[in-house]
Image: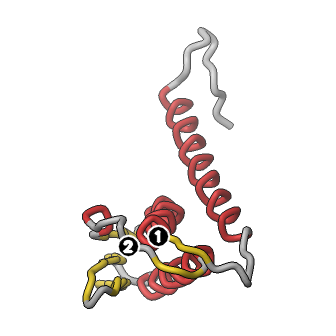
Amino acid sequence: MTTLLRKDDEFSKESLESLTKINQAVNRITKIVAGLRTLSRSDDTQKEEFWPVPCIQESIAMVKDIYRIDGIEIKSNIDDFSFDWATIGQADHFQQVIMNLLSNAKDAVSLAKTKLIEINLSSENESLIIEVSDIAVA
């Protein structure tokens, strides 16, 4: 087992790397828990106005670091897209759909050498179009 402190009470390079990895893991867990809390606040009868673009961003943020560990890159044009799109429905159910799409895409690329998930937004006839593509290169 690696000790965190040396005899001279200075952190070793390995200890700092370990602490950095622990901090990153804690941040990932915090994002996951925050996402689960959002999903758990579901009320099946309550519909309200919500903005899908931030829901998609939150979903990507929840899984991006975890997927990166598995060698899966997520690319999107979502940061270039307007937040002005609002709709009526249940944001938590919408977010669950996005999470399911991301999970399915992850499964589809899991055995490939190069793993990429792309999420692209566009609009047409006052509709928001969400495309989730899994790109696996053997």
- Asked whether the residues under the numbered discs 2 and 1 touch, taking CB atoms below 8 Å apart as contact, a structural biologist would say yes
Relative height, residue 7 to residue 33 (above, below): above
Q: Nearer the viewer, residue 89 or 53?
A: 89
Relative height, residue 18 to residue 97 (above, below): above
Q: Which residue is mark 1?
A: 51
Where does residue 36 sit, x and y in percent of width and height?
68, 65
Displayed quadrant of residue 138 = bottom left
- Residue shown at the point (64%, 34%) measured from the top left: 2
Where does residue 101 sit, x and y in percent of width and height?
49, 84
Q: Nearer the viewer, residue 79 or 85?
A: 85
Q: Which residue is mark 2?
A: 85
Displayed quadrant of residue 15 = top right
Among the two numbered marks 2 and 1 on one chain, the one whose residue lies closer to the N terminus:
1
Left or right, 125 with respect to 44, comes to left
The tag on residue 42 is: none
**How far is mark 2 from mark 1, CA to CA?**
6 Å
- Residue shown at the point (68%, 37%) measured from the top left: 1
Secondary structure under badge 2? loop
Left or right, 131 with respect to 22, comes to left
What colour scheme was applied to this rendering of the protein? secondary structure
Left or right, 49 with respect to 68, comes to right
Secondary structure under badge 1? loop
Q: Amino acid at mark 2?
A: Trp
Q: Amino acid at mark 1?
A: Trp
Hey, which residue is sitting farthest top in the picture?
A: 8
Q: Is residue 42 visible?
A: yes
